[in-house]
Image (spheres, grey):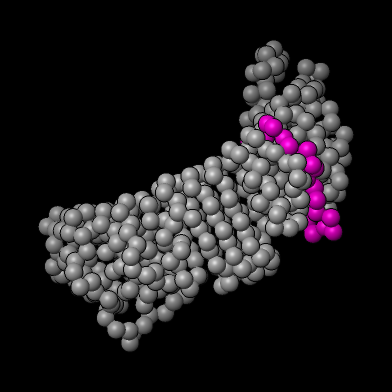
Amino acid sequence: MDRISGLSDELLLKILLLVPTKVAVSTSILSKRWEYLWMWLPKLEYGHRNSSSSDSESLQCFLDKNLPLHRAPVLESFRLDVSSANFEPVNIKLWVVIAVSHCLRELEIMYSLYHCKPNILPSNLYTCKSLVILKLNGKILLDVPRMALLPSLKTLQLQNVKYLNEESLQRLLYNCPVLEDLLVYLAINGVMEKLTLVVPSLQSLSLFIPMSYSIVGIVIQTPSLKYFKLKDHSDESHCLIENMPNLIEAYVDVHLPNINGLIGSITSVKRLAMCSEAIYDEGFVFNQLEHLNLCSSLENMSYLLPRLLKDSSNLQVLELSEMDNHGHFDDMDDWNKPSTVPECLLLSLQTFNWLKYTGTPEEKDIAVYILKNAAHLKTATIKYCEGQVPKFEMIKELALSSRASTKCQLMFLSI
């Protein structure tokens, strides 16, 4: 220990950063050399989801006593998990005030307690010039003052938080001029008339609206967006999404009855994962789409897939899977086979994957059509659940089907 104690403070702090904050604090009993060393740590993480009430009470006393004495001029990160016991909001607010005063760069708070006054965020947080990352998870009230400004904030995550009103989120986003990464996870059983996300600088957006959330409209204006993830399981919302000309990757899982507006905003995408039972109208073109992952009920896939193949002339990878909790339609008509072979099958498609293939006549017809017409196909992988499909019959049916590409390798994998 004496040899370690002889190292420089800078090197010792780097060592302490490799262990949990609680362990780093415990080194204060080793010797005078170590007594206050942990107080210079630039990264602090306190709390645990499974902490007992006594542990939480001890932590609250410890932070009240020691956090005001912390010596690091810059806090790279301050993480609080105060969701396991009854921490007083006034104490949490004071801790955040102190952290912000140390040129805080990253703040993460997990708080899932039901408290009559869940406002644990101080007003100085909303004007912190140094803050780059803000992550809030739980019953935290977002009450954004009019004078808010977060000039350095690039990453914002809001999961299950409470909003004072609709203007709170709009005001926060408006005052984050360099925001690049936004995640909004609306709380179960929440209510909002209109969700407005207007962020010109945004590069990545993830938005989840649960089935039980009551919302009428969604407005999204993010012209610089490159990554877009939307899970909208509500039955009421109407999306107004402006075009995203720089979009590279999108994941959309929606229960919306009309997806024309959504489709029109993402036509520039290169990688698309889509889970929907709705079918969009004709007239859209995905001229940059290279990778498509389509999840739908088998009934809707028989209409949606032909349209996407026709509209995606440069498609190289096609992956299919059936939505969970949807039965098979044995009396369903033949799938809506294209009147002419889509250009992507003739010129560009190289990879075809089917996840959870069950071998129904409808699935077989679709798979056979792809194999028969994809002239440049290199691999076709059929993944099935062990025990659900007679393996020999399935392999026989597809293996004996004609293939447009002599180089195509057909593989069967159990999952």
x and y, in percent, of residue 125 in the image: 75, 39
**Does 5 appear above or below 256?**
above
Taking 269 as reference, is 391 left or right? left
- The residue segment tinted magenta is 112-132
Q: Is residue 3 visible?
A: no
Q: Between residues 132 and 9, which one lies in front from this camera angle?
A: 132
Locate residue 167: give its quadrant: bottom right
Quadrant placement of the C terminus:
bottom left
Answer above or below: position of 299 versus 49: below
Q: Residue at x 14, y 64 (%)?
A: 403
Q: Residue at x 67, y 64 (%)?
A: 192
Determine the main secondary structure of the stretch shown in magenta: loop
Front-most of 295 and 413? 295
- Quadrant where the image shows the N terminus: top right
| Residue 88, percent from left and from top | 86, 49
- Write down the quadrant of residue 323 in the picture: bottom left
Q: Residue at x 38, y 52 (%)?
A: 269
What is the tally of numbered marks visible in this picture?
0
Q: From the top left corner, tell me how far across and down residue 34 is, in percent.
A: 77, 21
Residue at position x 62%, y 59% in the image = 195
Q: Provide residue 114's location: percent of width, then percent of height.
A: 79, 59
- Res 352 visible: yes
269 drawn magenta: no
Work out whether 32 lies above or below 144: above
Q: Nearer the viewer, residue 349 or 405?
A: 349
Q: Is residue 277 left or right of residue 110?
A: left
In the rendered image, residue 116 lying in the magenta stretch gets the answer: yes
